[in-house]
Amino acid sequence: LGSHVIGEVTIDQCIGGARGVKCMLWETSNLDPEEGIRFRGLTIPECQEVLPTYSGKQGEGEPLMESLLWLLLTSEVPTKEQVDTLTAE
């Protein structure tokens, strides 16, 4: 993606606080029409399998919201301890 052009920018736009400039790339999820949504490369069933859950056991129940947030921000599957720290903060 490094050489892909996403728009043109003028000096006035730079000085004016980048108003109207496409300048952010966010790659946390991908929505495929056939496969469904992926979060950092993981499908929803894969997230349910590997992320810490409300039950406290990975693979049993729905992931904690903080575990999904950790995955989106860091691209890493968190431990239960990391999720608990995030929840406490």
Image (cartoon, rainbow, N blue to C red):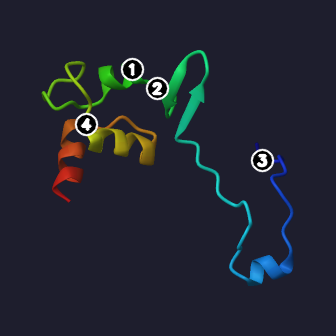
Relative to 20, 71 lies left or right: left
- Residue at image mark 3: 2
- The CA span between labels 3 and 2 is 23 Å
The three-letter amino acid code for the residue at tag 1 is Glu
For label 2, the residue is 42
Q: Are marks 2 and 1 in contact (CB under 8 Å)?
A: yes
> Dot 2: few (<14), some (14–19), or many (≥20) neighbours within 10 Å?
some
Image quadrant for the C terminus?
Answer: bottom left
User: Which residue is under mark 4?
Assistant: 79
Which residue sits at x=76%, y=78%? 14
Task: Determine whether, in the image, residue 54 is placed left or right of residue 17.
Answer: left
Specify the amino acid type for callout 3. Answer: Gly
Under tag 1, what secondary structure?
helix
Check if mark 4's residue and mark 3's residue have beta carbons within 8 Å: no
Dot placed on the residue nearer the N-terminal end, 4 or 1: 1
Element at label 3: loop
Tell whether 34 sits left or right of 40: right
**Mark 1 lies on residue:** 46
Q: Earlier in the sequence, mark 4 or mark 3?
A: 3
Q: On the rendered image, what quadrant is the N terminus found in?
A: top right
Q: Nearer the viewer, residue 43 or 19?
A: 19
Q: Earlier in the sequence, mark 3 or mark 1?
A: 3
Q: Amino acid at mark 4?
A: Thr
Per the model, the C-alpha gap separating discs 2 and 1 is: 6 Å
Q: Please provide percent x and percent y for residue 36.
A: 53, 21
Q: Image point 73% across, 68% down: which residue?
A: 20
Question: Looking at the picture, does residue 7 appear above or below residue 31?
Answer: below
In space, the residues marked 3 and 1 are separated at their CA atoms by: 29 Å
